[in-house]
Image (cartoon, grey):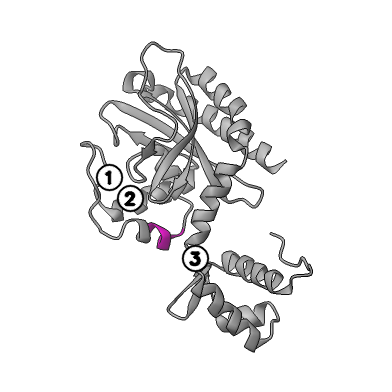
Amino acid sequence: MTTGITTQAPAIDKATRIFHFIAKHDGATYTQIYQGLSLPQSSTSALLASLVTNGLLRQNDGKYFLGLVFYEFGNKAIEQFNIKDLAAEPLSFLRDKTQLACHLGVLDGNSAIYLAKVESPSAIQVKSWLGRKLSLHSSALGKALLAWETEQRVDELFPNENLVIKTQNTITTKTAYKKELKKIREQGWAFDNSEDFDEVTCLAAPVYDKNGKVIAAISTSGVRFQMPNERINEFVQYLLAATKMLSDKIKS
């Protein structure tokens, strides 16, 4: 993470250093910021106040955090980035290995959204389309995208304990959902066990940028008999190979 670049716009340089510092430390106090970055106290205080006013930072319990506007910027940046072109080969690889429909998705506010898709060659299709939004708590894609976000971000997206029930397998509480996200982080992939739609299963795993941040996810989905339990581990390996391919392309 680059933080020491100096340009002819020192205020922007300083703000950028502050953003990196806060991101690295998952929030920081005023004292931690100016001491950690060796910045002058008075101008740093004024700059932090301005960044909060403009939504680039937010303040809570004496600490500064990145503002939600960064999530909006991040989603727009991904839309403008040629990630859809880069994903063509990994998605086709995954489709050829699984014979299932495969998607590339990103966070879009309080949903996941499909950016790219390759169709299954099978006569049996799971209905989907570009721009389709999915639930973050009941879809594999949504869970894979949110698993590496902060707990505070999860709480912001799910302010209530009870979650919307989509099927009899849907995770119904935020407490259980957080346990699921922890499991996903540990194993590196997410599973939708007919939690969003009856008899539809899905696997998803994250895609990383050069800084190790999750910026997208790839999924493969089909009706239950197309993804039998005995082939889950095999499909996971294909999925992880596809996400590594895309992550490597983004980092290069």
- Contact, CB < 8 Å: mark 3 with mark 2? no
Nearer mark to the viewer, of 1 and 3: 3
Residue type, mark 1 in image: Ile
Q: Reply above or below: 53 against 85.
A: below
Please tell me in which quadrant of the rendered image residue 221 appears.
top left
- Disc 2 designates what residue? 177
Rendered-image quadrant of the N terminus = bottom right
Q: Which residues are magenta?
A: 150-154
Splitting the image into 4 quarters, where does residue 13 fall?
A: bottom right
Which numbered disc flags the more N-terminal residue, 3 or 2? Answer: 3
Query: Mostly what secondary structure, the magenta segment?
Result: helix
Which residue does the image show at 38% across and 27% down from the upper left? Answer: 128
Q: Residue tagged by mark 1?
A: 171
Mark 3 lies on a secondary structure that is: loop
* Distance of label 3 from label 2 (alpha carbons): 24 Å
Name the element at disc 1: loop
Point 56% across, 82% down: residue: 30
Image position of 161 with respect to 10: above or below = above
Residue 65 is left or right of residue 222, and the answer is right
What amino acid is at disc 3? Gly
Sequence-earlier tag: 1 or 3 = 3
Tag 2 near tag 1, CB within 8 Å: yes
Callout 2: few (<14), some (14-19), or many (20+) C-alpha neighbours within 10 Å? many
**What whole-number distance in Å separates the C-alpha atoms at marks 2 and 1?**
6 Å
Q: Is residue 66 above or below residue 212?
A: below
| 220 relative to 9 in the view: left or right | left
Counting from the top left corner in percent of width and height, residue 21 is at 62, 69
- Secondary structure, mark 2, is helix
Residue farthest bottom in this picture: 42
Instruction: Give whichever of discs 2 and 1 has the lower sequence position.
Output: 1
Task: Give the crowd class for mark 1: few <14, some 14-19, many >=20 residues within 10 Å.
Answer: many
Q: Count neighbours of disc 3 (C-alpha within 10 A) and say few if under 14, some if 14 to 19, many if 20 or more.
A: some
